[in-house]
Image (cartoon, coloured by chain):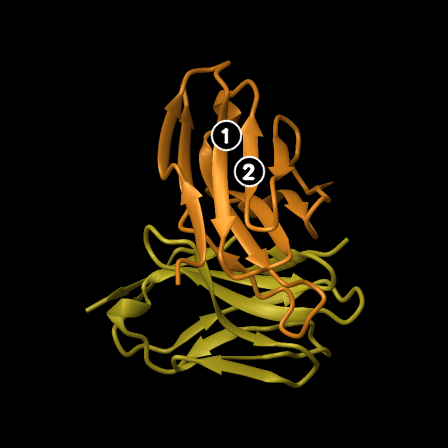
Chain colours: A yellow, B orange
């Protein structure tokens, strides 16, 4: 079936550190891939997306590249801020969205 | 723009009580969804409605019922609440089948505790 596996958290970083959150997906069909972010006390909101192989999604300094050969969509940011503290969800979609379990990121000043 | 509005934000129930979570969207989306979020489990789809007049089971439908009242509103009902239904519930919507499909807009969540 369709599934998404992302690195378990929590992840704790200092401000301005480099961030990577790994995500891999099952290769059934040709899914679109997404990263959603959930700030404390809020619902999820779309962070970025990629709809085909080699596409790079980017937003707010975050990037992720759709890698078909490794079935991965790792989230990266070069310099995190305290305001990036949130839970990050990787998701895939052919027909319905399937979410990973989420990774809690805490950025300390 | 209100987006997706859920009520109530918080609710405490006793085992066996019933309640309905309400959801409304003002974006003219055709598809609506109910998810539950539990620690270590991520988001799991309970029910969805691809279009007005249709509803389908998701991954974890047992113990729940839904009603797509009209294009705007999609309610989730617990007929006899159980402690295992303690969770945060999210409603979401999109225009599935169109460009940008599967980009969901989420409500702020409803935190339900069943004692």
Determine whether, in the image, residue A53 is placed left or right of residue A10: right
Residue B20, disc: 1
Determine whether, in the image, residue B16 is placed left or right of residue B110: right
Disc 1 vs disc 2: Cβ atoms closer than 8 Å? yes
List the single residue furthest toward the top: B16
Q: Using the image as rendered, state which of residue A73 and residue B49 is in the foreground.
A: B49
Query: Quadrant of the image for the N terminus of chain B?
Result: bottom left
The quadrant in which residue A39 appears is bottom left
Q: Using the image as rendered, state which of residue A21 and residue B33 is in the foreground.
A: B33
Mark 2 surroundings within 10 Å by alpha-carbon count, few (fewer than 14), some (14 through 19), many (20 or more)? many
Determine whether, in the image, residue A35 is placed left or right of residue A37: right
Chain at numbered mark 2: B
- Measure the C-alpha gap from mark 1 to mark 2: 7 Å
Among numbered discs 1 and 2, the one appearing first in the sequence = 1
Location of residue B85 with respect to A13 vertically, above or below:
above
Residue B75, disc: 2
Residue A27 position within the rendered picture, expressed as x and y whole percent measured from the top left: 76, 67
Location of residue A15 with respect to A8 vertically, above or below:
below
**Residue shown at the point (51%, 21%) measured from the top left:** B81
The secondary element bearing badge 1 is classed as: strand
Mark 1 surroundings within 10 Å by alpha-carbon count, few (fewer than 14), some (14 through 19), many (20 or more)? some
Residue A102 position within the rendered picture, expressed as x and y whole percent measured from the top left: 49, 55
The secondary element bearing badge 2 is classed as: strand
The quadrant in which residue A37 appears is bottom left
**Residue shown at the point (51%, 47%) measured from the top left:** B91
The answer, for residue B25, to whether it is visible in the render is: yes
């Amino acid at each position: 079936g369709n599934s998404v596996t992302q690195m378990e958290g929590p992840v704790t970083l200092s401000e301005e550190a480099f961030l990577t959150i790994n995500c891999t997906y099952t290769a059934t069909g040709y899914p679109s891939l997404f990263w959603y972010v959930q700030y404390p006390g809020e619902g999820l909101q779309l962070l970025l997306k990629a709809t085909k192989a080699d596409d790079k999604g980017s937003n707010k300094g975050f990037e992720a590249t759709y890698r078909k050969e490794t079935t991965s969509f790792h989230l990266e940011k070069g310099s995190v801020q305290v305001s990036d503290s949130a839970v990050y969800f990787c998701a895939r979609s052919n027909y319905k969205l399937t979410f990973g379990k989420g990774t809690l990121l805490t950025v300390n000043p | 723009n209100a987006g997706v509005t859920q009520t109530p934000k918080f609710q405490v129930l006793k085992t066996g009580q019933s309640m309905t979570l309400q959801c409304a969207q003002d974006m003219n989306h055709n598809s609506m969804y109910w998810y539950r979020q539990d620690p270590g489990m991520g988001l799991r789809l309970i029910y969805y409605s691809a279009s007005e007049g249709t509803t389908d089971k998701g991954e974890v439908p047992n113990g729940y019922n839904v009603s797509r009242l009209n294009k705007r509103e999609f309610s989730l009902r617990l007929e006899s609440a159980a402690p295992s239904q303690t969770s945060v519930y999210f409603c979401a919507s999109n225009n599935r089948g169109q460009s940008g499909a599967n980009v969901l807009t989420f409500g702020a969540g409803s935190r339900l505790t069943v004692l």
